[in-house]
Amino acid sequence: MKEVQNVMQQLDAIRSALIEGDIYQSIPEKVLVVMDGVQYKTRRTHVVVPEDNESVLQRITAIDERIKTKGKEATISDEELDDLLRHLASPDSQVRDKGVFYLFNRLLRQTVLTPAQLILVKDRLLQDDYLFAHILEPENDAVFLRSFSAMFLAGILYANRTFYHVLSTAELLAIERRVMAYTVIELDSRGYVDGKGWAHAMTHIINVWSELNETPEIQRADKILMMAIVLQAYRFSDNALAYGEDSHLTNVLISLMNKHQLYVDYCLIVLQEWQRSLLTMAPQDTVGFWNRWYNRNRFLQSLLLQPELPDKIADYLRKISDLF
């Protein structure tokens, strides 16, 4: 997908300049330039979704029973895995969320997948027709496939770090690279979708970010860049992030800042840039504007409630607290 490649190339350039020491404080603004430059489409195309709900739920139950019976001796075929992944596109929450997602977590936690299958799933999720399916089009049902691809990648990263230890540094960086591009491009940050269940793309992005932060093979410059990208995506969401995204973002940010003072300093840079932009911003009579405004308020209030919030951040937030 040409537009995805274009975004990744721009992010690669920012990353290289950061690693070389050519840029630092300007990263949030540069990320915003990339976000603003994405060329979205004005029309939807047909989203193909699986329609065999009853039969796939039976297959999920059968695989689950196999795991319960055989435990770590259980196996799953590549064909069964393909079938499960295909049903991430289902707009039926019983299939996608309570079916495939719950089963996949059990497969990972009981290490049913072989190392080769873990890599197979990782590669599939990173493909354009999964992580970036219909992403440039107006709001559509493919958000479930995109969002749950991100969520499953978080599971893959957790399982690799905890049990498998098979992904190379190059593979981990490739995951980060494509997830950063996904975070920049994704506009559909709806939480719960009536009649279809959780989309929750922002929450799932934060989950992947959290796992990448725990990955020692990824250097600090990458974690700084990912922080800036996630915070900018949160900041410019036109949807109301009112389904726990604020506290989830806060928890992951606190965890990262506890790892090194560098992340505290960079979080402050991002918050200060965000604050400066408000001083020249005129209120707009749009839902998007007010969603962004109150998303920020909830996030900053959530930060201030954190007992482990670094003093440097807490002092700054108290200083500007009359503006949120």
Image: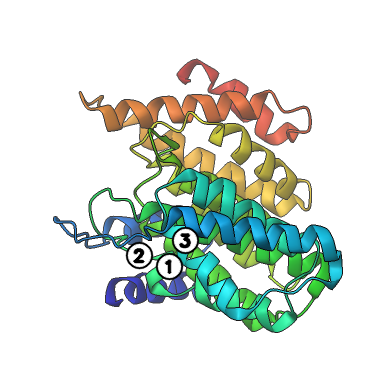
Q: Residues within 10 Å of mark 3 (few under 14, many from 20)?
A: many
**Image point (29%, 71%), residue name:** 3
| Marks 1 and 3, the one that precedes in the sequence | 3
How far across and how far down the image is residue 218, in percent?
69, 70
How far across and how far down the image is residue 188, in percent?
35, 47
**Image point (64%, 79%), residue name:** 119
Mark 3 highlights which residue? 87
Q: Compared to 297, does 256 lie above or below?
A: below
Q: Compared to 304, does 29 lie above or below?
A: below
Residue type at mark 3 is His
Residue type at mark 1 is Tyr
Q: Residues within 10 Å of mark 2 (few under 14, many from 20)?
A: many
Mark 1 vs mark 3, foreground winner is: 3
Q: Residue furthest left?
A: 42
Quarter that holds the N terminus: bottom left
Mark 1 highlights which residue? 130
Mark 2 vs mark 3, foreground winner is: 3
Distance, label 2 to label 3, CA atoms, is 14 Å
